Image (tube, rainbow, N blue to C red):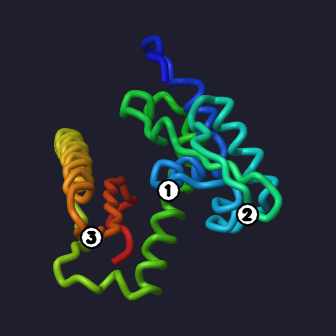
Amino acid sequence: MAKQPAGLVDPRLAKALSHPMRTRILTILNERVASPNEIAEMIHERLPNVSYHVRALQDLGCIELVRTAQRRGAIEHYYRALTRPFFSDRDWKRLPRSGRQAVADVILQMIWEDTSYAIEKGTFESRSDRHLSRSPFVLDEQGWGELNALLAKVLGQAEEIAVNSAKRLAKSDRAEIPTRLVMMHFETEGAGPP
């Protein structure tokens, strides 16, 4: 996507992520190449609705057609993402609260679905070295900022690890380990639930 003037959120990305279904579709197409039919099955939505939002994402320059295939007398179109459903900290602050909430709702739903699926399939506890923690803290403004900076650094390092893993996997016959990394840091009201 083109560089935006200072002070503005990329309007194409903001529009792409303004609808929960487009956020889901763009997230899926960042993980794999898929057709609207496959996406509709994955997210349990009607194909015409998914196709509409796929076309919108393509018109916004967020996804591209990568191939077609003949399927049961029709041509199935397969797409991949050109951009990640991601806002910089600066852009996130410029979004209206309702826009931030809409994106957060979709992400939290996907986290819940990923977790539920792993529990259902027995992979959540399949490794003794997996990580799960919940750590309540009381912070001042400086501590809040320091913790957010640390999480951004961890995410950057995690992305580097994923890139390096993909390179090693491409050169070997090692088994892939599909994973999800979830990080959250948020303010609560008082002590919150136990």
Nearest-to-viewer mark from 3 and 2: 2
Q: Residues within 10 Å of mark 2 (few under 14, many from 20)?
A: few
- Residue labelled with disc 2: 45
Q: Which of the two labelled residues, at mark 1 and mark 3, occupies the earlier sequence position?
A: 1
Q: Identify the amino acid type marked 1.
A: Ile
Q: Is residue 165 left or right of residue 55?
A: left
Q: Is residue 86 left or right of residue 73?
A: left
Q: Identify the amino acid type marked 2.
A: Glu
Nearest-to-viewer mark from 1 and 2: 2
Q: Secondary structure at mark 2?
A: loop
- Residue labelled with disc 1: 107
State the mark number for residue 124. Answer: none
Q: Residue furthest top?
A: 5
Q: Is residue 106 left or right of residue 38?
A: left
Q: Which of the two labelled residues, at mark 3 and mark 2, occupies the earlier sequence position?
A: 2
Q: Which of the two labelled residues, at mark 1 and mark 2, occupies the earlier sequence position?
A: 2
Residue closest to the eye, 153 or 191 = 153
Q: Position of residue 122 (x, y in %)?
A: 38, 88
Asked whether residue 70 appears in the rendered view, the answer is yes
Q: Position of residue 87 (x, y in %)?
A: 43, 35
Q: Is residue 108 above or below residue 148?
A: below
- Residue labelled with disc 3: 134
Q: Secondary structure at mark 1?
A: helix
Nearest-to-viewer mark from 1 and 3: 1
Residue 47, quarter of picture: bottom right
